[in-house]
Amino acid sequence: MIIERFKLTCDKLISYQQLASCCDYTGISLRGKDILIYSNGGLERKPWSPQPLQLTGHHGEITSMTFGKRNSPVLLCSASADYVIIWNVEVCQRRVSEGQVAAGTIIGTLPGPVVHLSFCSSDERVAACCGATAYILSSQKRETISTLTGHLGPLTSAEFCTWNKHILSTTSEDRTFTVWDLQNESVFYHSFVMSASPLLSVFFMKENGHIITGSADGQVWCFSLQDDFSCQLVTKIDLHKSEQRHQAGVAEKSSEVDISKPVLKIASFNSCNDSTDAEKGDESWLCVGSTDGLYVVNLATSELVTVLHFKDNPDLSVAMAGSWVFSDKHIKSMLFLVSSLFTPCVGLLEFFLDDAVRIEAGSRGFSIFPSSPPMLESPLNAELKKKEPNHLKKKGGIKEQPLVFHSKVKSSGYTSTPRKLIFTPKTTAQKSQSSMKTNKKGLLLKDYPEDTAAPSVVRVHLSITNKPVYCIQYSGDGKQILCGLGDNSVLMYKSSLTGNPAVYTGHDKPVSSVSWSLNRQCWLSASHDQTLRLWTHDVPEPAVIMGKNMFSKHIKAAQFYYLDKFLLLGSGDSLHMYLYHVDVTHDDIKRYQQRSFVKLSSCFSTSAGADITDLSTVNDFFAYIVLASVSNRSIQVFDMNKGIVAAEVPDAHSRAVHCITQNKGSMFSTQAPESYNLFLTSAVTDGLKLWDLRTLRCVRRYDNHVNRCHSCSSAISPCGRFIACGSEDKCAYVYDIRSSCYLHKLQRHSETVLSVAFNPATPQLLTGTLDGKISLFDPSSGLRLSCDTRSAAHNISNMAL
């Protein structure tokens, strides 16, 4: 919601002139050479008729002006082709009240018009953009501290770093921006050519250490300022495309005529929407002022929160904006001064933040933890009826038969003397440490370290085949690894990647999915040959083969579900749920007859009839929710307790999601219950998104990796603090889940990284590449590289024979 607090008709058009506004005052030019200062203290009075303070001192036409960053004293800097003047507003008011003439201090005389002015955080220095040069002037005396040259075109803006006054950033019509070291008058970072249009504005965001710049064609880039003062691209936002997606989401029609959306000014404020822990690291939103209105962008997700068009508010005096100035942030609103593009007037507008917060909050969604037991008619209550063996009745009575084949039977001991001491407990046994857990088999489990660093150092590098490693997965205890390969086979390694792997063959096409059971006694492999195979330990033949005649299309994903009770798989537009029985014993006569079998329990279809591209659900505990990505770019939430599609997220990505990953933790770690409601989705050319199941909204976006054509997977660490994903630049990226910037760029890969997996027991990361190599990474304090270039599964076809 936008309300116009103040309107002033000027004596001339000031469309592209830099205006001045702060929390207490508003400044505009009068007759080109004078300045009018209005107090914002009477905003609530209607009608508002303040007495402005008039400042006179320039001989030429004023081209730019700005207020200082400090609240006391309030300084105003104005510039024309002849002078750069500093005004102390409070001193000038006092002099006028005493009948004297308000006067300022001339701090510079520059050779040409100044297009932009900016104060540092302490108001000690002023940056003035004149032509292709940025001048750093002292606000106390007439002194030029630095002269910065290097751009190939005229400068458009300059801003001091809000947390380091010795850093300045400038933008130019040469379509680049530069980060300057003011102490040494050198360049920290000079960007590449960003766009086909000039860069117009730059902004420092103190909350997360970002530099944000915008261009004349509506592009916004967000960079992270590193410790060495270099810049790392975090995300890029196209206002025009973001608006189209936003309008599609709210079922509005886009405008018939597309207009350019230049980024005239950028500001920020912190939202109070803290629905997830993942958001707390970065709750800032961007306010982007353009010619047609105000764009509010959630920086964490790179999505529009709301768009406030001038045309939708006919009561405003400004229909198209020429320049923007944002004042200091209020508690629940933000003030900004806007000049009209085609008429000689300005307006002081107020934007209420609570309205945007309500829009962003959305409705309450689901929880991964069930709140009630399954219904009586729930598909989850299905049971497998085992057939009882038919015993043939023999003719005649039952004859007496000996119980044993020998003549003597050992005494039962009834006639012996009874024992007086049956059991003696051991009192010398030491208790185990409190940091150890016990699993169902009584084995001690060591806790997953919660304060360890992310894996970043290569420990093992293996070349296992010359075909792609499409999928990898650790067993629940972290001791074994399954690798699904493009040569139609599956390899089973020890977690240390030592020794030769067990090789399982039988598929006719590349293996697309592998999955361990919860008890680690069985595992699944699905292939593009439209078959699913269930394997057991130490048995080279599958216990169950689900053939081509059972599915119309190849199986995209398959896994165990509901504490290993069901087999869940997606094929075509259907979600299949099977009951199964595994019996690996064989009759000596009927050797090739399998005793294992499966039975279709339920089959569910997607709401739009589109094909399932991936699915995910939790098997470690009873969970009703199954997440499925669909080829129509949506995410569908299946409630298996009711057997329905409970919710749908349309247009989750610009393309169909190829990987969906939930935060499942592990038996070695414990997370906050809310963290298990987070899940990841990946799509080609559209980055990686983190979602919250409770609101079904994207809470963060990760865009540093490259994913243009391959289906690169992603994974969440067992501690829930890190995200790993593959990339096509021969690297794997590790993100902090709370920040959109990557922590580590894991190189030393020879091809595209297709698959990634975290070890559930120790802080290790495993990656698989397009050319058949796997690498194991440890934290920086872990073991050093031990490289084995030999193929551990050399000539797999010969081994299978």
Image: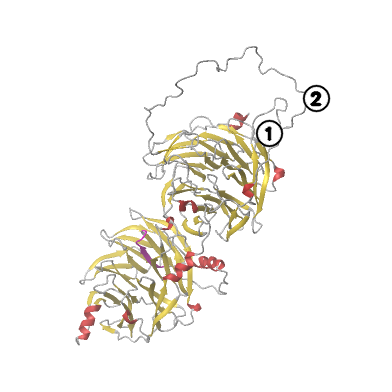
Q: Is residue 209 above or below residue 788?
A: below
Q: Is disc 2 surrounded by few (<14), some (14 to 19) or many (20+) residues within 10 Å?
A: few
Most foreground residue, 325 or 660? 660
Q: Which mark is residue 595?
A: 1
Q: Is residue 759 above or below residue 606?
A: above
Visible residue check, residue 710: no
Q: Earlier in the sequence, mark 1 or mark 2?
A: 2
- Residue 100 x %, y %: 19, 86
Position of 474 with respect to 780 (left or right) is right
Specify whether 461 is left or right of 190: right
User: What is the span of residues highlighted in magenta in the rendered image?
Assistant: 199-208
Quadrant of the rendering where the N terminus is positioned: bottom left
Q: Main secondary structure of the magenta part?
A: strand
Compare residues 783 and 77 and report the one nearer the observer. 783
Q: CA distance from mark 1 to mark 2?
A: 29 Å
Q: Would you identify the image quadrant in which residue 405 lies?
A: top right
Q: Does the magenta run of residues contain 207?
A: yes
Q: Nearer the viewer, residue 377 or 777?
A: 377
Q: Is residue 402 above or below residue 49?
A: above
Mark number, residue 89: none
Amino acid on which the number 1 mark rests in the picture:
Arg
Q: Nearer the viewer, mark 1 or mark 2?
A: 2
Q: SS at mark 1?
A: loop
Which quadrant is the C terminus positioned in? Answer: top right
Residue 796, can we see it?
yes
Kind of residue at badge 2: Lys
In-image side of 738 versus 574 (left or right)? left
The residue beneath circle 2 is 395
